[in-house]
Image (tube, helix red, strand yellow):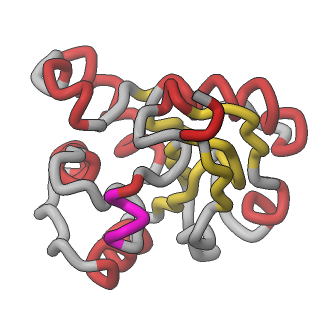
Amino acid sequence: MAQDYKRFKHPWEAVFNAESKALILGSFPSPASREFGFYYGHPRNAFWRVLAEVLGVEEPADTIAARREFVLLHKIALWDTIESCEIKGASDSAIRNAAPHKFKPLLAATKIRHIFTNGKKSAEIFNSLAAAEAKMSAIYLPSTSPANVKMFGDPAFRAAWNQVAEAVK
């Protein structure tokens, strides 16, 4: 029902520094992430575990400061493809009327040469609505969402995410 949808604006800035080499984009923060106050804040989202595994390091502590430091130390930038959208609940399939962020300023301020998306919706929206402005296309990575848990042990899942480790070498 239309009345169940609500328009949201992205709550945070991108996390990056001048040394960032790879950008990982989600679609839009889930209600759990918005409540936590940072990217991939749902306790069952495997993002932080998967990223630590492919980088061959310890997973960061479950704090905003530790997670921010973790990605910056490993030359990774975080953001989401969508700047604002209408959404009902947490599912990417419930996103509509999405407006993408502007990526050119971020890319100009960093060494980013690879853009990865965490999930199909982010890849679809970035490559259709933001790639021309960014002058780069995004590489799809399978989602670390709890809804995709059955894929985490798949060698293809791990191989896809290993691209991030290669990009930041």
Closest to the observer, 47 or 8: 8
* Residue found farthest to the right: 133
Identify which residue is drawn at 81% across, 63% down: 108
Residue 41 magenta: no
Corner quadrant of residue 150:
top left
x and y percentages locating residue 166 in the rendered image: 40, 41
| Range of residues picked out in magenta | 32-36
* Residue 19 seen anywhere in this rendered image of the structure: no
**Side (left or right) of 11 relative to 108:** left
Closest to the observer, 89 or 70: 89
**Image height of 145 relative to 15, above or below:** above
x and y percentages locating residue 1 in the rendered image: 57, 28
**Side (left or right) of 119 relative to 58:** right
**Side (left or right) of 18 relative to 31:** right
Identify which residue is drawn at 47% across, 44% down: 167
* Residue found farthest to the bottom: 65
x and y percentages locating residue 134 in the rendered image: 82, 44
Corner quadrant of residue 146:
top left
x and y percentages locating residue 56 in the rendered image: 16, 52
**Image height of 97 relative to 93, above or below:** below
Identify which residue is drawn at 15% across, 59% down: 57
Identify which residue is drawn at 47% across, 54% down: 29
